[in-house]
Image (cartoon, coloured by chain):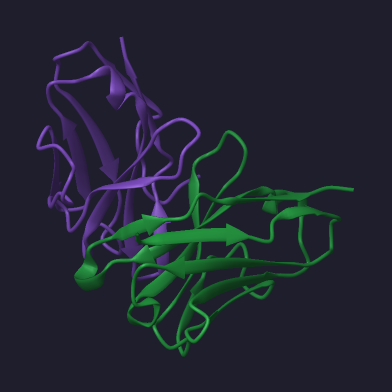
Chain colours: A green, B purple
Amino acid sequence: EVQLVESGGGLVQPGGSLRLSCAASGFTFSRYWMHWVRQAPGKGLVWVSRINTDGSSTNYADSVKGRFTISRDNAENTLYLQMNSLRAEDTAVYYCARDGLYNSGLDVWGQGTTVTVSS
Amino acid sequence: QSVLTQPPSASGTPGQRVTISCSGSRSNIGSNFVYWYQQLPGTAPKLLIYRNNQRPSGVPDRFSGSKSGTSASLAISGLRSEDEADYYCVAWDDSLSGVVFGGGTKLTVL
C-alpha cells in the first residue's frame, strides 16, 4: 500500500526548533519530488516547500525561507522538514505529499502531524 | 491573502450542478497547470483534478475541471451530500518559484 506517515510534531516554544519526518512506503521514494503543505487551525492549505528527487533542488514559501530546511534520505525513504526560529504563526497541521509523475499533482498525502508554537 | 482567488463558500441542493471559480494571473494559472483538491472534514486533502481537466482513477466523472486564460473552474454535477467539503485550486507560480493555493471554497449541500 502506498503510504506516507508524518511524525515529529509537538509543542514548542517560540524561537525553538523541531524536525518533522515523513516515512514513505509502497512506492519507489527516490523517483518522486516531495512537498510539505501546512494548515493552520480553521484555515486553508498553504504550501511550504518542495524537494526534487535527489535533494539537489529545493523551493520554499517566502514565509519560511531561511528558517525551514527540507531534505530527504532516499536510502531510508524519508522526507524531513527542519524548522528553526519557530513563530506562533507556524502553528499548523503539517502534511507531506508526493508529487506524482508527469505533472499529475500531489497524488498521495500523509495524515498530518500537528505543530503548536506557544509559550 | 491567497495568490489564487476562490469564493469562500458555495452551495447547492442534491442533484444540482455547482461551479467553483479560481482566479489567478499570468505567472500561475496563465502559464501552468491547475489542480483541484478536496478536503473532507478532519481528513487530509485528496487530489481531484490534475493538469487542468484530468481525473485520477477513482474520482467520479461528476467532477470536471476547466481552464481559460488566467482562470479555472471546478464543476460538480449531480451534487451529493458526500461532496460537502472544502475545495482548493492550486498552481505553480513562475514569479514566486513556488506552489500557490487558493483560499479554499467550502461547499455546502443543502
Q: Determine whether A16 is above or below B16 in the image.
A: below
Residue A99 lies, in percent from the top left, at: 34, 67
- Whether residue B96 can be seen here: no
Residue A59 lies, in percent from the top left, at: 48, 75
Q: Quadrant of residue A34?
A: bottom left
Task: Describe residue A113's horizontal placement relative to residue A83 as left or right.
Answer: left
Residue A15 lies, in percent from the top left, at: 84, 63
Task: Describe residue A64's horizontal placement relative to residue A108 as left or right.
Answer: right
Q: Residue furthest right?
A: A119
Residue at image position (45%, 85%) is A57
Depth order, front residue of B23/A50 = A50
Depth order, front residue of A26/A37 = A26
Task: Describe residue A94's horizontal placement relative to residue A103 as left or right.
Answer: right
Residue A94 lies, in percent from the top left, at: 58, 54
Residue at image position (60%, 67%) is A21
Q: Determine whether B17 is above or below B68 in the image.
A: above
Residue at image position (20%, 40%) is B73
Q: Can you say which quadrant of the picture contains the N terminus of chain A?
A: bottom left
Depth order, front residue of A108/B4 = A108
Task: Describe residue B64's horizontal placement relative to residue A75 as left or right.
Answer: left
Q: Residue furthest front?
A: A1
